[in-house]
Image (cartoon, helix red, strand yellow):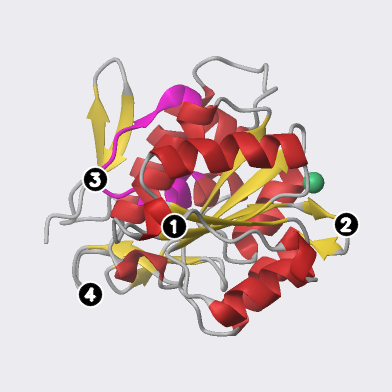
Amino acid sequence: MKTSFIPSSCSSCQTGAVRLLLVEDDASLGQVLVRGLVEEGHAVDHVMTVAGAAEAASINEYDLVVLDLGLPDGDGVDLCRTIRASGSGVPVLMLTARDGLSDKVAGLDAGADDYLTKPFDYPELAARVRALLRRPASATKPILGVGDQVTGIRLDPAAHTVWRGAIMVPLTAREFSLLEFLLRRVGDVCRREELLEHVWDANYDGLSNVVDVHIANLRRKLELPGLGDPIETVRGVGYRIVDSD
Ligand code: CA
């Protein structure tokens, strides 16, 4: 087990930067990611197995986990579920294979905060890592939402329910995923392409305005009498939900 555990670079430890656990069995991809993340001043432990990850997590506390789905001795989704079951809210970025829509859904259901589809360019991974590290700890709580109990929105990923104030709002599966994605990035503009990739999938080739159509439906359902439109349109770019509190 120990052989799969490569201690982090000491030069990066000394900066007092965040500590990342990278679980990736593709050695060359792992090296590229370690090099990039260390250059950004992070401490990185790279393991290649579920067992290696469990051992590393028993020794160190991590600020973020980058987790490949297919591992030689187990499944990244199960590992993610184990992390969450232990009560840890550590942000988890999952790496999934192209076409693996069900993998993405399973990953998010297991408590992953974000996912990246392989193959990806390193700068995109670095940007996702930065975004996850910027998030307040409260963002990793299971219930997502903005606003207060009276007018706000609450989304419970586990129970698959959405509330606007005190009223439960029935949504289609796609509308639910779209709202969940926006709520996981409160304050950030979500580009249409990003929504297409994450909520539909990278190979979606249907109507080009499918995002806008679903956003319109979501707005109609969430815009209850006396309660405003929670979704902002950022012209020419995409959409965002802002927490007005
Ligand atoms: Ca793999």
Q: Mark 2 or mark 3, which is nearer to you?
A: 2
For the N terminus, give its image quadrant: bottom right
Q: Amino acid at mark 3?
A: Gly
Instruction: From the image, tell me which residue sits under label 3.
Output: 187
Secondary structure beneath disc 3?
loop
Q: Nearer the viewer, residue 141 or 207?
A: 141
Secondary structure beneath disc 1?
helix
Q: Residues within 10 Å of mark 1 (few under 14, many from 20)?
A: few
Residue at image position (36%, 46%) is 41
Mark earlier in primary sequence (3, 4): 4
Q: Residues within 10 Å of mark 2 (few under 14, many from 20)?
A: few
Query: Relative to residue 176, is residue 98 depicted above or below?
Result: above
Q: Amino acid at mark 4?
A: Gln
Mark 3 CB near ligand 1 (8 Å cut) = no
Q: Residues within 10 Å of mark 3 (few under 14, many from 20)?
A: some
Quadrant hosting residue 151:
bottom left
For the C terminus, give its image quadrant: bottom left
Instruction: From the image, tell me which residue sits under label 1.
Output: 10
Residue found at the far left of this picture: 245
Q: Nearer the viewer, residue 91 or 56?
A: 56
Please indicate whether residue 41 sits to the left or right of residue 177 in the image: left
Instruction: Give the CA distance from mark 2 to mark 3.
Output: 38 Å
Residue at image position (29%, 61%) is 16
Q: Mark 1 or mark 3, which is nearer to you?
A: 1
Please indicate whether residue 43 sits to the left or right of residue 235 in the image: right
- How many marks on residues? 4
Mark earlier in primary sequence (1, 3): 1
Q: Amino acid at mark 1?
A: Cys
* Residue 149 numbered tag: 4
Q: Mark 4 or mark 2, which is nearer to you?
A: 2
The boundaries of the magenta stretch are: 178-193
